[in-house]
Image: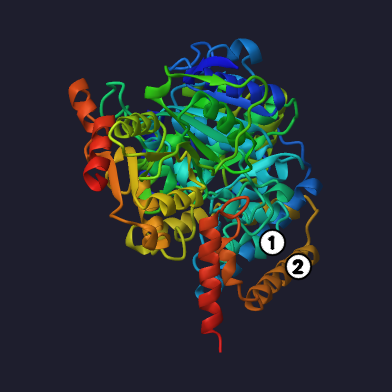
Amino acid sequence: MADVAVRQELAGGSLPARDILTLLAPSGVRREDPALECDLDAGAAARLWEAMVIGRRLDRAAVALTRQGELGVYASSAGQEACQVGPVLALDAEDWMFPTYRETVAVVTRGVDPVEALALYRGSAHCGFDPRAARIAPSATPIATQALHAVGFAMAAARTGSSVAALAFLGDGATSEGDAHEALNFAGVFRAPCVFFVQNNGWAISVPIEHQAGNVVLAARGAAYGIPALRIDGNDVLATYAATRAALARARSGGGPTLIEAVTYRMEAHTTADDPSRYREAAVLDAWRQRDPLARMERYLRDAGVLDDARVASVTAEADERAARLRRALQDAAPLDPLRLFDHVYSAPTPLLERQRAQLADELSRMEP
Amino acid sequence: MAQLTYREAVARGITQEMERDPTVLLIGEDVGAAGGAFKATVGLLERFGPARVRDTPIAEQAIIGAAMGAAMTGLRPIAEIMFSDFFAVCWDLVANQIAKTRYMTNGQVTLPLVIRSGNGGGSRFGAQHSQSVESWAMAIPGLKVVAPSTPTDVVGLLAAAVRDPDPVLFFEQKSLYATKGEVPDGEVVDELGTAKVVRQGSDATIVALAAMVPRAVAAASELAGEGIEATVIDLRSLVPLDVSTVAASVAATGHLFTVEENPRLCGWGAELTSVVADECFYDLDGPIVRVTTPHVPLPAADALEDLALPSPSLIADTVRRRIG
């Protein structure tokens, strides 16, 4: 009956509360939960809030830059900042994360320059950052494939005796793919040190969660794979941080994988090419605005005395400056070398590629004035 | 020298590379305890242990996806897809991910992995377990594609594939597993992208791959009895494609025939034909002719399957009628 209740809540667009672990109420009041321990005091937690402020500002800039034609398309993280900042800041430096296209805030929080993080959306490169330096796999655009890569990566890391763990981001939509099943099953069988962080934002483009899953409690799947699972409030950055931190500790100690379902909401369109007014009521957004991840964290930090107007103003100013730098960098970007088309298909070009490259170079030389 | 079967050569090649390089490992369905569905990996689990020879659930996407993730850590996995038909189950990982990762990361993430697979017909396995899918792989930029025909080439090309910095699809022809050949002692390492002239003749060039190579050689022997001397080239590798060896032979013989196990449309011979027509047109003394399996799914019935696959007599007859 509990499932039915949750399904009805979600289907009605209201807010699911049942069995969801929360450390920070939407009002900003700190709670304790024996199932989810958070070792951060308010002072240390302030960096989570800062990263969310910066992430949201850059996300908003990316949407605007898409409208201005500087980016081809963009999948906004708006409303999901806690789901992306918390897990990333829970990682150790040596860990790897395996993001999808909606994780720009996560990628930036990991330390990647926003210009590099957005190269995929600009079309200037498929992957603008160095995955090895950032310890972030290239963002996966086929759905759920990254979960498989994360499992293999984690298995290999465990084999070498290192304490490196892998963090795979998935959306609720990805859990419908066969890849997700195979990844979870493999991880369960081989006890891979891998954390599956599912951002259940309610939507697979236009398909709501109750039309994606017979049981909308995605965390329930963990039991089927022998994987510990928990369902948390995805708009509570203390919960996303603490749950991921605990899961990574389990992975490092040989305890195997964890499935985390973070219940959140996609506040923007699927991408800038999508029009959600065709399939959902805008009124639902009002309820979710009351659960905004930044607002509750700011309330909590102010009440705890670690945040005041001056610090809010200075973090906001820094976020604005980073957005301005992003804008300038994209507007001033140099044109690409067309012959780059042939680079890195193989470790060394095949004779066929060399001929085709020479042919294009010849065409270009005759086109130039 | 040792007399080895094609399937023993697979295990020999994997053993050679796993002993040389501790980062090489084997992962797939039934590759360990069972020694492989085609017994091509017998003894490897006992020799290298379960950490390096890993049996998996029936999960092709996970095998290939995990191999990719492992390769990102610097390991050199050899993943097995039992029947090459099953590439259809995990093609997203192969075509969209593995093939493109180097390109999409500007060379920063490389995937030195090998995917071995039992390929081709002649074993009465029916339409879903008999296909020759090397042409699928050839169509994807970023993949290298190898299909050996002899035990020595299995060892040497497998070694080259494992050591190559790019992802390589390594097609083992199922109908060749029981065939035997001499394999040199010691380390055997070959070179990808090199065709091999297995028979010299001045009247025609017959280019074949994998199981079609012994059939082409048999056809050439038959023709020799009639005074027609054919060169037979074992292509061995589709990507990179050794056009120069073929072109040099065509310049000498003036006639090109391809013998392909794949169904007709877009087989590897179509690409080779187009390149030769483009680059060697004035060396040709007649049309280029492709001998292929008809464009049908392979039947399970033995008599029908035998009729579908190019036979030595069909190859010989095709050459005879064109140049005789």
Identity of the amino acid at label 1? Ile
- Estimate the x, y position of residue A354 in percent, counting from the top left: 56, 61
Identity of the residue drawn at 43% across and 20% down: B177
- Estimate the x, y position of residue A8 in percent, counting from the top left: 36, 40
> Image quadrant of residue A187?
top right
The front one of B221 and A259 is: B221
B111 vs B117, left or right, is right
Q: Which of marks 2 and 1 is nearer the N terminus?
A: 1
Identity of the residue drawn at 69% across and 61% down: A54
The front one of A259 and B16 is: B16
B269 vs A330: above or below? above
Residue A318: mark:
2
B275 vs A328, left or right, is left
Can residue A19 be seen here? The reply is: no
> Image quadrant of residue B233?
top left
The front one of A12 and A190 is: A190
B44 vs B90: above or below? above
Look at the image and tell me in which quarter the N terminus of chain B lies: top right
Badge 2 element = helix
Chain assignment, label 1: A
- Estimate the x, y position of residue B236 in percent, counting from the top left: 48, 38
* Badge 2 vs badge 1, beta-carbon distance below 8 Å: yes
Instruction: Count how many numbered circles sit on residues in the image.
Output: 2
Can residue A42 be seen here? The reply is: yes
Residue A54: mark:
1
Distance between mark 2 and mark 1 Cα atoms: 8 Å
Identity of the amino acid at label 2? Glu
Identity of the residue drawn at 66% across and 47% down: A136
Q: Residues within 10 Å of mark 2 (few under 14, many from 20)?
A: some
The front one of A156 and A108 is: A156
Look at the image and tell me in which quarter the C terminus of chain B lies: top left
